[in-house]
Amino acid sequence: MKKISFLLLLALLSAPAVYACPVCERNKPKILQGITPHGSMPNSNWDYVIVIIAVLLLLISLFFSVKWLISPKEGNSDHIKFSIIK
């Protein structure tokens, strides 16, 4: 419990460090204001395309991971999951 409390406190104390300064915030594209901290901004529209594709792949893999974890559709009586369930 102490470890979880310490990690939560650490996360709360470090949260202001991820916000950008007013100058960086002003120079960001409107869509990224308030989201990203300091750092380089997108150089072209291809950066947005790459990020959108990566997010879509992540969501698809998350969907199938959860779907097959909940319902793997394995009916063989000698499947390994039955040795764990019993």
Image (spheres, helix red, strand yellow):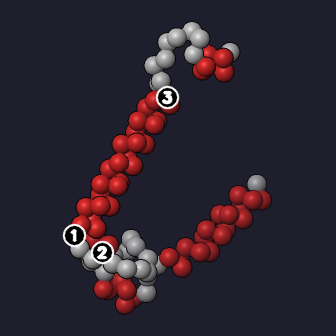
Residue type beneath disc 1: Asn
| Location of residue 66 in the rendering, given as x and y in whole percent from the top left corner | 46, 36
Quadrant hosting residue 31 = bottom left
Quadrant hosting residue 45 = bottom left
Query: Which residue is the extreme one toward the right?
Result: 2
Q: Vertically, is 69 above or below 80?
A: below
- Label annotation for residue 45: 1
Q: Secondary structure at mark 3?
A: helix
Q: Earlier in the sequence, mark 3 or mark 1?
A: 1
Q: Earlier in the sequence, mark 2 or mark 3?
A: 2
Residue type beneath disc 3: Ile
Q: Which residue is mark 3?
A: 70
**Mark 3 vs mark 1, CA separation in Å:** 38 Å
Q: Secondary structure at mark 1?
A: helix
Q: Which residue is mark 2?
A: 42
Contact, mark 1 vs mark 2 (Cβ under 8 Å): yes
**Mark 3 vs mark 1: in front:** 1
**Mark 1 vs mark 2, CA separation in Å:** 7 Å
Q: How many marks?
A: 3
| Location of residue 77 in the rendering, given as x and y in whole percent from the top left corner | 57, 9
- Left or right, residue 4 beside residue 31: right
- Left or right, residue 22 beside residue 18: left
Which quarter of the rendered picture does the N terminus lie within? bottom right
**Mark 2 vs mark 3: in front:** 2
| Location of residue 42 in the rendering, given as x and y in whole percent from the top left corner | 30, 75
- Label annotation for residue 31: none
Q: Residues within 10 Å of mark 2 (few under 14, many from 20)?
A: few
Residue type beneath disc 2: Pro
- Left or right, residue 20 beside residue 8: left
**Mark 2 vs mark 3, CA separation in Å:** 38 Å
Q: Residue at x 49, y 12 (%)?
A: 75
